Image (cartoon, rainbow, N blue to C red):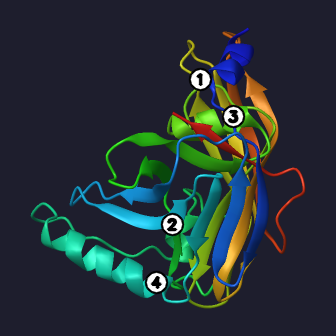
């Protein structure tokens, strides 16, 4: 019943993705009726909003994937650093930072390679005032809800996609294992991240596939095995889910 409730509580919008080509991520959100708007992210350090793309009256989203993405991120980081608390230093992520592991079982090629991804994308009106939810690339709406809640709450089998820009070729391969506490008595389980990731210079589609889940005695469902790989093309069963 809990999983069904989560499914019903989501605002699920099927999106047929047109392409990740010509430096643009675009697609149609079906049954969209909120009018023209912007696709933004929020800078928690400066309190600023950044515009990444647009959505039109017909639900067509367009997010330019610029070749100068890392330069833009560096500029944002420099502005944010000026307002950062004293002693706090902003650092651009590397492949080793992004796919890090507590135990040294993941081997990196070009570990210092800068890697930065699209942030969580929010829909707003043209004046950036009214938020109309966040959008997630998944094949299971329960996963979108889990992501929206900072990877807390129940999850299910399936995958979600992230879009990363890498400054060069780099790789992360190996198994990362961490012990996780369910919150029930002394119940724990081992969570495995299986990295088989090879990134190319430029934009990369990275799939996080939840292959196995752990079911707690209290009914909670946690990700137990997640496989991380690069995709050459977008999956046929991909949908975009909006969560408010």
The span from disc 4 to disc 1 (Cα, nearest Å) is: 37 Å
* Residue occupying image coordinates x 51% and y 84%: 112
Q: Judging from the image, what secondary structure is the residue with disc 3 in? A: loop
**The residue tagged with tag 4: helix, strand or loop?**
helix
Residue that badge 2 annotates: 53
Residue nearer the viewer, 243 or 230: 243
- Picture coordinates of residue 64, whole percent (x, y): 57, 76
At x 60% / y 67%, what residue is drawn?
A: 62
223, above or below 77, in the image:
above
Q: List the residue tagged with mark 3.
A: 12
SS class of the residue under badge 1?
A: loop
Q: Position of residue 169 (x, y in %)?
A: 67, 89
Measured in 3D between alpha carbons, the distance from the residue under mark 4 to the one under mark 2, in whole angstroms, is 17 Å
Residue on which the image places disc 4: 70
Label 2: state its secondary structure: strand
Q: Looking at the image, is mark 3 or mark 4 nearer the viewer?
A: 3
* Between discs 4 and 2, the one toward the N terminus: 2
């Amino acid at each position: 019943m809990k999983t069904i409730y989560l499914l019903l509580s989501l605002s699920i919008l099927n999106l047929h993705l047109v392409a990740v080509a010509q430096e643009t991520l675009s697609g149609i959100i079906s049954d969209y009726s909120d009018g023209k708007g912007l696709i933004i992210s929020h800078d928690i350090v400066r309190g600023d909003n950044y515009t990444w793309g647009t959505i039109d009256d017909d639900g067509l989203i367009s997010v330019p994937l610029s070749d100068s993405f890392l330069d833009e991120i560096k500029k944002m980081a420099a502005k944010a650093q000026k307002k950062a608390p004293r002693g706090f230093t902003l650092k651009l992520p590397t492949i080793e930072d992004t796919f890090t592991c507590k135990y040294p079982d993941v081997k990196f090629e070009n570990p210092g390679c800068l890697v930065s991804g699209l942030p969580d994308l929010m829909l707003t009106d043209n004046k950036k005032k009214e938020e109309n939810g966040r959008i997630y690339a998944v094949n299971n709406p329960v996963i979108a809800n889990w992501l929206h809640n900072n990877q807390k709450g129940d999850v299910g089998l399936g995958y979600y996609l992230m879009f990363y820009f890498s400054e060069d070729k780099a790789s992360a391969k190996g198994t990362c294992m961490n012990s996780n506490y369910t919150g029930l008595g002394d119940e724990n389980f081992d969570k495995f991240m299986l990295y088989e990731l090879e990134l190319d210079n430029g934009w990369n589609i990275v799939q996080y596939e939840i292959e196995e889940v752990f079911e707690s005695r209290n009914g909670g469902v946690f990700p137990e095995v997640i496989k991380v790989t690069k995709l050459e093309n977008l999956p046929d069963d991909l949908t975009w889910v909006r969560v408010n």
